[in-house]
């Protein structure tokens, strides 16, 4: 690293070390505000909404440009404390924040990670539930649900069956947040087991439920992501550390194979927000004693960092028209892994595809135009902290009315009910046709 940058690191402010105890809302807010004030050049603190009882849903962004997205810089997020009585993840994310900002310009790896990634950290999605716990318990406490007694991890739209529960303020805040950022990779942190679980959580025959599983078109990537986290956690990777729990080979499992779940957040992220999300169960006991928190940090620190790095897998780039203008709402997918809700470019024409090393055919489809196919190879050893960059320059001229950008997302209905087989979604023109009909019908 440049000696000048190391010297600059010595000039950064120092915040008092975060202690290992449970931080209630007031203490958590004080810590987050202190970090945002003392590391204002690389952090941005904001609330994405309010809980039922009016508590802020805080998000701290860490990055070189924390207040705004920058082209080519992928967006990553961690969310914890969705169930108010599952507390380890909440504290781990506070310590992760402390570690990231205090290591910047001092640790080359962390500095490079922050400079190349925009990291969003939400320590508590359910602050009301956390504050409601009167008697901490390893298995169940009255703070699991939000203040209206809704399980937030059963509260999202579902792609496989109707989920008609009333959407809660915390859920709606997450859904709106996902519309404002181009999130690429995420994890939500839970407790009560020791495993990394990956989508789908729900399913139909077309996704493999007859075989007691439900797989996404990106199953190879999801298994890699889950294993990346579990393999660096010395207890999770053993797969059998919780008493009276099933064995999880290598510390990972397909969500549906574990138990079917309707209205879960990780499926919603993947299908409607183009964001790969897994669920991390971090402790056998949901609300362990405070003195065990340092052990959990030691077990998870390397995993938390290594998982963030995976946002740089695969290929990224922009799609332009013949004049060099970026094209929004263009479908960009691998030819043989089409999604039920097609992955599209954002308003800046950007796309991000998480892929493992190998050869692929990329299908670029502008609505109303022919598809463009391009072969590319993801190298086994790519540039650190950067996906392969591939821009597309298409021989057409964009007119504001020629490519709809007003509402490009798919309708929030059980999309798989309208697909007789998963193969139907592998044909881009047919998939676009179905999505158009569904949107018109359910608009």
Image (cartoon, helix red, strand yellow):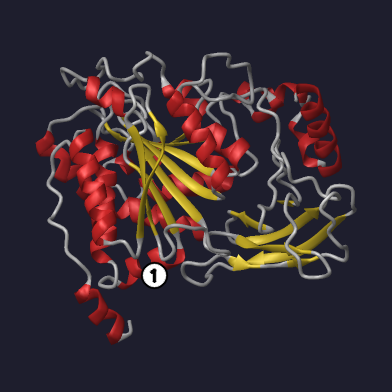
Task: Tell me where residue 267 sits by quadrant.
Answer: top right
Tell me where residue 133 appears, x and y as whole percent.
Answer: 21, 20
Mark 1 nearby-residue class (10 Å; few <14, some 14–19, many ≥20): some
- Give the side of residue 50 with respect to residue 429, left or right: left
- Name the quadrant containing residue 35: bottom left
- Most foreground residue, 424 or 11: 11
User: Would you place residue 435 above or below residue 20 in this image?
Assistant: above
Residue 169 rendering spot, x and y as whole percentages: 45, 25
Residue 402 image position (x, y, % from top left): 86, 50
- Is residue 259 something one can see in this rendering? no
Q: Which residue is mark 1?
A: 112
In the rendered image, the residue lying farthest to the bottom is 3
Q: Residue at x 80, y 37 (%)?
A: 431
* Depth check, front residue: 153 or 398: 398
Residue 4 is at least partly visible in this image: yes
Residue at image location 50% in from the left, 44% down from the top: 223
Please tell me how many numbered marks the rendered image carries. 1
10 vs 191: above or below: below
For the residue labelled by badge 1, is the local secondary structure a helix, a strand or a loop? helix
Give the quarter of the figure containing the N terminus. bottom left
Residue 227 image offset from top left, x and y in percent: 43, 47
Residue lying at 50% horizontally and 40% vertically, measured from the top left:
177
- Relative side of 359 to 287, left or right: right
Q: Quadrant of the C terminus?
A: top right
Q: Which of these two is toward me, 208 or 30?
A: 30
Q: Residue furthest left?
A: 291
As drawn, is 416 to the left or to the right of 61? right
Q: Would residue 387 be found to the left or right of residue 433 on screen?
A: left
Task: Find residue 404 and report its image quarter.
Answer: top right
């Amino acid at each position: 690293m440049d000696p000048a940058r190391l010297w600059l690191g010595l000039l950064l402010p120092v915040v008092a070390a975060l202690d290992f105890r449970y931080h209630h809302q007031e203490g958590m807010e004080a810590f987050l505000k202190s970090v945002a004030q003392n590391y204002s050049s690389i952090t941005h603190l904001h609330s994405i909404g309010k809980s039922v009882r009016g508590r802020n849903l805080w998000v701290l962004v860490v990055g070189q440009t924390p207040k705004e997205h920058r082209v080519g810089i992928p967006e990553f997020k961690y969310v914890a404390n969705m169930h108010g009585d599952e507390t380890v993840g909440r504290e781990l994310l506070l310590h992760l924040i402390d570690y990231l900002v205090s290591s910047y310009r001092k640790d080359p790896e962390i500095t490079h990670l922050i400079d190349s990634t925009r990291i969003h950290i939400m320590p508590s999605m359910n602050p009301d539930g956390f504050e409601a716990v009167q008697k901490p318990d390893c298995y169940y406490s009255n703070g699991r649900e939000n203040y209206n007694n809704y399980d937030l991890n059963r509260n999202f739209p579902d792609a496989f069956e109707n989920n008609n529960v009333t959407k809660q303020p915390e859920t709606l805040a997450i859904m709106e947040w996902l519309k404002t950022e181009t999130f690429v990779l995420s994890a939500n942190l839970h407790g009560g087991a020791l495993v990394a679980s990956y989508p789908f959580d729900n399913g139909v025959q077309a996704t493999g439920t007859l075989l007691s599983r439900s797989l996404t078109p990106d199953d190879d990537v999801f298994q890699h992501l889950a294993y990346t986290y579990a393999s660096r956690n010395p207890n999770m990777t053993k797969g059998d550390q919780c008493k009276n729990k099933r064995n999880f080979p290598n510390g990972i499992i397909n969500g549906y194979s574990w138990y079917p779940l309707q209205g879960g957040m990780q499926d919603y992220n993947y299908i409607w927000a183009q964001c790969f999300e897994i669920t991390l169960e971090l402790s056998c006991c949901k609300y362990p004693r405070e003195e065990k928190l340092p052990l959990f940090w030691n077990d998870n620190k390397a995993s938390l960092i290594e998982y963030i790095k995976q946002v740089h897998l695969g290929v990224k780039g922009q799609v332009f028209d013949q004049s060099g203008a970026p094209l929004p709402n263009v479908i960009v997918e691998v030819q043989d892994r089409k999604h039920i809700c097609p992955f599209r470019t954002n308003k800046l024409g950007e796309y991000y595809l998480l892929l493992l090393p190998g050869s692929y055919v990329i299908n670029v489809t502008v609505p109303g135009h022919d598809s463009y196919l391009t072969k590319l190879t993801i190298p086994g050893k790519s540039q650190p902290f950067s996906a392969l960059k591939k821009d597309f320059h298409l021989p057409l001229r964009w007119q504001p009315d020629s490519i709809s950008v007003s509402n490009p997302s798919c309708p929030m209905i059980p999309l798989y009910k309208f697909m007789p087989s998963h193969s139907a979604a592998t044909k881009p023109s047919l998939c676009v046709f179905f999505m158009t009909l569904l949107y018109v019908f359910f608009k």
